[in-house]
Amino acid sequence: MFMPVIGYALVILFACLYAVTSSIEFGAAALLFPKKPFIDRQSMHAYMTPIWEAVNVFLIFTVVAFVMFFPGAIPTVALALYVPLSCALIFYGLRIVGIQGVLYSESDNYLFKLLFMVGSLCGPASLSLAYYYLLTGMDPFVPTLTELALVGTVISAIYAISSSFFLYFIPKNSQQLRLSHLAVAAELIFAASSLVFLALIAQYLASVFGVLLLTIVIAAIGLAYMAAIHHSKYVWGLVLSALNAVLLIAGIAIMHAPYILYHVLDIYSTFTSVEIFTDVLIALPFGLLAIVPAIYLLFKMYAVRT
Amino acid sequence: MPIDTTIHVLASRVFFGDTLAFHIFFALLGVGLPLLVSFFEFLGAYFNDKDFMAMARRMGYAMIVLFITGAISGTIVSVQLNLLFPHFMAFANKIIGLPFVLEGFAFTVEAVFLGVYLFSWDRLDKWTHWWCSVPLVIGSTGSAILITMVNSFMNAPQGFSIYGDQPINISPIAAIFNQAFPYEALHSIPAYYLTATFAIAGIMAFMLLKASVRKDPEKNRFYKKILTTTLGVAFVFACFVGILGDLSGKYLERNEPLKLAAAESIYHTQPDAPLRLAGYVGNDDLHDGITIPGGLSYILYDGNLQGVVRGLDNFDPSTWPPLFIHYFLDLMVLIGIFLGAVPLLYFTLYKYKRSLAFSWPMLWLVLLGSFSAFCAVEFGWMVTEIGRQPYIIHGVMTVSQAVTSASQVPIFGAIFPLFYVLLFIITTWLLISHYRKPMDPVAVTHH
């Protein structure tokens, strides 16, 4: 049956889009936080608004696509992941409080920056625990090296993508050198932790060859990234850091198929009704007809503004 | 230790109820404000009026701050719906999943055009800029309509059969366009518009009560103009909401008679059914209330006192919803009448004794209307949601069948309201801090 595969592919696509676009804003929280920040607040405001509100829709699409295409998975997943997902919601909420204070108030209040940073790091960390459970079927509250490697991968990817974004879009940043050092360090940590993570979860994935290939590609892209940053080719840095994150997410998802929850739930047994799937596929092009021109208009306006 | 199911179900209900109540407060502003902003900008562009244009521009900050708050609370609602009621979502998504997807599209259009609209004031000519508000209105209203589709399905499920515990013979279109949908949508959406309009009117009234504003001729003129405009719009919406409220009541008698019987405190099936207001709801009857003989039959059957209204005795008592929804219905209707009466009084005074239209008692009535409009929307949702209990899908699935067995629900049920309070305080502080600053005058460009 190809229908569950299409549904699974759409969930992965939305997850990748969300991971890359949201990393910019998640990482910005940490870049802004230190006493000597890597970027200034005004620059962050100029380059993040108004697009950051729009990219958060990819999270909604990921969640909606998952629960709609695979509703049979909801009871088991919701029960097992009640705590990490509820914690993620709280952290996301605290992040929003921080964003409101940082972007939409006149004050440079440290508390807002703290909430923004805590929410932006702990939210993805909570989601990482949830993802760990789906990948391995293991209790997410028993700390393992695999979990630590996953959290390290996620956080470092956020830093790498966000740093690359601001390196490119704020060329006259007074902290350019520090930011580029941070970007390189983040990508190094990402490469190292993702390779450790891949090695530890290989037993849960369908193809050892695929794991090896993914490992080599991630390492190669990591090296290319460092070269790009060293030579101030920041647009390439942004593309490569995003590409590395996407390849990791998509690669693991493909090799983990057909499982949603390892050895317990798969995409076939949890799939929705044929009628809903068909209606959604019909509605999808019409929805894209509305969204794609709108996003193009927004980014065009954003480019003019910046 | 085994989980106490009763406490468990109650905790999930209360937790989700808190979340919905908080979300509705901000979501309705997210639906209503774009329409008002678009309306003001249209008036400003059409009449070359700098006041309306300035008002539209000034409301932009509120739109984005409230959108952000509504977005995070909406995300919490959608995730918690899956976490708290997973068996419901596993069942219902196979039938009514399409509106969730479409709502994602509508939300995206709204989010994108919110950005386009707010950041293109000085880049586009007045009419092109106004046209950017149209998708924003469509997106925000569309989101509300699509979520109402799902809720109406819960009240009037159709478009499927059941085999074992699984839905079969599924027709998503029939499920979406169920019998409750037109009444819920046409009653609730204008109610959101009405509330947002009254919110703006209330702010205008508040400003006019300030001595510093009354002493400034220019500010005085501006706020009076906007107040008059918003109350005119509010009156139109109040009439529409009232008419659709009447039709909704008639729909309930035909299709959800148990909910109506509980809300109207009709304990016995009867013709010439009385309209019963206030009082004390007991298990056997409403005590010490105001009774208008034949009133309910008269309303539901367009003057025919012989129209039979089904009472609670017509239904198994184990399926009765909590009978205290009677109070919420009474309050909602009372506020609805008040929201129609306030603009009527205002315009009567405006025509015959203008000074009284801007007197402090009238302005306080507008302020009271502003606050009570939010309460009316919350009460209305309580009637429809609590009135469906014990079912989550009427006649198909009860809340206790749908609910999670996660033991941490009460803990998070206590934590999340604290977060909502924090978010409310921060949002309010942001808005007050911003709007304390004086307005910039806006020149209307001619293209």
Image (tube, coloured by chain):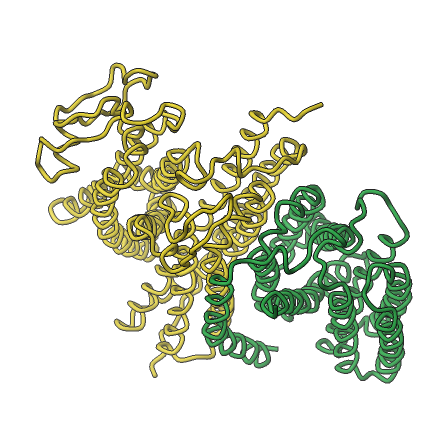
Chain colours: A green, B yellow
Name the residue rendered at 62%, 77% in the picture. A306
- Among all residues in the image, which is located at the extreme front? B163
| Quarter of the view holding residue B51 | bottom left
Taking the image as drawn, is residue B292 in sight? yes
Where in the figure is residue A220, as x and y percent of width and height? 88, 79
| Quarter of the view holding residue A57 | bottom right
Query: In this orientation, which residue lies closer to the viewer: B363 or A253?
Result: A253
Quadrant for the N terminus of chain B in the image: top right
| Quarter of the view holding residue B261 | top left
| Residue A8 higher or lower than B194, as above or below | below
| Residue A306 higher or lower than A85, as above or below | below
Query: In this orientation, which residue lies closer to the viewer: B424 or A266?
Result: A266
Taking the image as drawn, is residue A113 in sight? no
Where in the figure is residue A256, as x and y percent of width and height? 76, 63
Name the residue rendered at 26%, 71% in the picture. B47
Name the residue rendered at 59%, 49% in the picture. B79
Where in the figure is residue A71, as x and y percent of width and height? 58, 53
* Number of numbered discs visible in the structure rendering: 0
Query: In this orientation, which residue lies closer to the viewer: B18 or B371?
Result: B18
Quadrant for the C terminus of chain B in the image: bottom left
Residue B423 lies left or right of residue B361; in this view the side is: right
Query: In this orientation, which residue lies closer to the viewer: B335 or B244?
Result: B244
Residue B414 lies left or right of residue B111; in this view the side is: right
Residue A32 lies left or right of residue A290; in this view the side is: right
Where in the figure is residue B323, as x and y percent of width and height? 36, 25
